[in-house]
Amino acid sequence: MWVAGDTSSVAMWESPGARQRRSTRSQNIWAAYRAEAGAPAWQRLTEYDHAVDAVRPATPHWYLGVLATRPDRQGEGLATAVMAPVLERADADGIDCFLETSRPGNRAFYERRGFTDVADVPMVSGPPTWWLRRAPATTDTDTAPLVQ
């Protein structure tokens, strides 16, 4: 989790392989949520997870689960700032970043930050949802031909 200094913005990333390493503590948290939210809400969440999993790659990747900025602080670059550490690390490690969104306006925001590959998430119900991919940035030296 990366937070702007005054907690006005937060980015919550899932690291490569995190889904496979879910702990007992995490399972207990989801069980408590299920008990509190009830069966209909749990069913909707399960359907959503299955739809996202249908487009989620099996290869290691960073996943941006939450990006939020207080409305009165939007437009100040805080969201970009809290995303930057993971984007930089993903670039250095050569790893893709992914996220999903259901808000058409968010697509333009993320596109400006390199999330240019888009796939539709096959939702049974709910709003149109898109899975966005950001390939790791390369430098000129990464693509230059080798010289012997």
Image (spheres, rainbow, N blue to C red):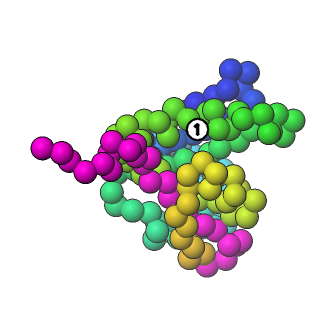
Q: Quadrant of residue 76?
A: top right
Q: Can residue 21 be seen in this snapshot? A: no
Residue 98 x, y percent position in the rendering: 50, 54
Please state if 40 lies on the left or on the right of 122 as rendered: right
Residue 108 x, y percent position in the rendering: 69, 58
> Camera-side residue: 132 or 127?
132
Question: Which residue does the image show at 64% across and 51% down from the upper left?
Answer: 112
Please state if 84 lies on the left or on the right of 36 as rendered: left
Question: Which residue does the image show at 82% across and 34% down from the upper left?
Answer: 73
Q: Is residue 143 magenta?
A: yes
Residue 13 x, y percent position in the rendering: 52, 41
The amino acid marked with disc number 1 is Met
Q: Can residue 86 be seen in this snapshot? A: yes
Q: How many marks?
A: 1
Question: Which residue does the image show at 37% across and 37% down from the upper left?
Answer: 92
When the figure is inspected, residue 16 is found, relative to residue 120, above or below; the finding is above
**Residue ranking furthest to the right:** 72
**Residue ranking furthest to the front:** 148
Magenta highlight range? 124-148
